[in-house]
Image (tube, grey):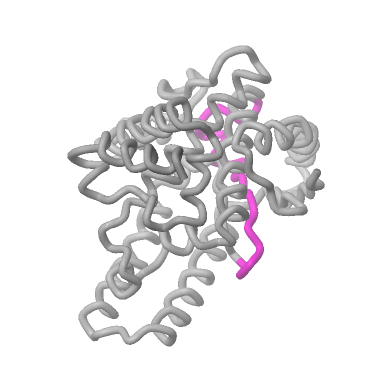
Amino acid sequence: MPSVDVRNEAGPRFDPLAARLDALAVETLPLVEAVTGLPLPDPVVIRTMTVRDWKREHRRSAQRQLQSETEELDVPLKALHQAGMQSGARQRFRRRFWPTMGGQAVLFEPGRPELVLLPKALRHAGRLDDTAFLYKALGHEMTHLAQYAASDGATWAAQDTFYPAQRGIADRDYAFLLEGHAYWADQQITTKILGAPVATDEASPHASRRYRKLAASPHRHAALEQFRRACDTVSQIVNSHGLDVFNQVWHRPDLVPTQKETSDDVAAWRVRFSALRTQ
């Protein structure tokens, strides 16, 4: 079983949080592997970070990715401009919505996936001392780490690319797959630990006014509704065809749902797994 490496980089006052995360992660880790049927990277690195450092690391990794992808691919000028605009939009989103991002699976360094938690964001959300929420966050984000390991990083790279058209995946909806799978998994994991899935649709009574305003934004509501649909769809595929069949998606890019399927005909994505049961 992989080891857990918790690193508190948010300051000494969050040492107790880091200790709690260490204990909760040791309990959660084997359930992630059991529920998903996927291995986790070893070690599982969990970092608490300041918001300033988190933003800086995202800017740095985005710049490195944009440069490496531009050098790798034959990118037309229009696509290069669009990529720069997209990178800026991602930065603006993080600057505005960071209080809603208590936990995140990241790749700040190539080949080194990590789980990052922002104590300041957890405080805004009223979840800093919410053990049930921390179980959910760890289960959810560790599932993303398992996705990375199962696909050797390919699914993360496809979701985050600045050039989906040049990579021939512009019609694929990787977010629907990755988030739907992670939400499905964290429901199973928290049920095994706590007896019921942890729901976080409603803001904590301890949440800040800033958090409540961001959580009530139409953008966030639309994203959560799409993730709920994705979670339900993954659950239906696993229940109908089995975990082994579903997990072929991590090394079969042709099984990733299309944008048309996730927006108009999600049943068509489920059907595509039927043929695999006879192979």
Q: Residue placed farthest to the left in the image?
A: 264
* x and y, in percent, of residue 230 in the image: 36, 35
Q: Residue placed farthest to the front in the image?
A: 278
Mark count: 0
Residues 73 and 95: in front is 73
| Left or right of 103, for residue 224 | left
Residue at figure coordinates x 31%, y 31% from the top left: 225
Compared to residue 74, the image places residue 273 above or below, namely above
Compared to residue 163, the image places residue 239 above or below, namely above
In which quadrant will I find the N terminus?
top right
Q: Quadrant of residue 131?
A: top right
Residues 242 and 105: in front is 242
Compared to residue 82, the image places residue 207 above or below, namely above
Q: Quadrant of residue 130?
A: top right
Residue stretch in magenta: 109-129
Residue at figure coordinates x 59%, y 45% from the top left: 118
* x and y, in percent, of residue 246 in the image: 48, 40
Compared to residue 217, the image places residue 96 above or below, namely below
Residue at figure coordinates x 43%, y 79% from the top left: 69
* x and y, in percent, of residue 93 in the image: 36, 53
* x and y, in percent, of residue 156 in the image: 49, 58
Residues 59 and 140: in front is 140
Specify whether residue 46 is painted magenta. Answer: no
Specify whether residue 115 is painted magenta. Answer: yes
Residue at figure coordinates x 70%, y 48% from the top left: 46
| Left or right of 184, for residue 271 | left
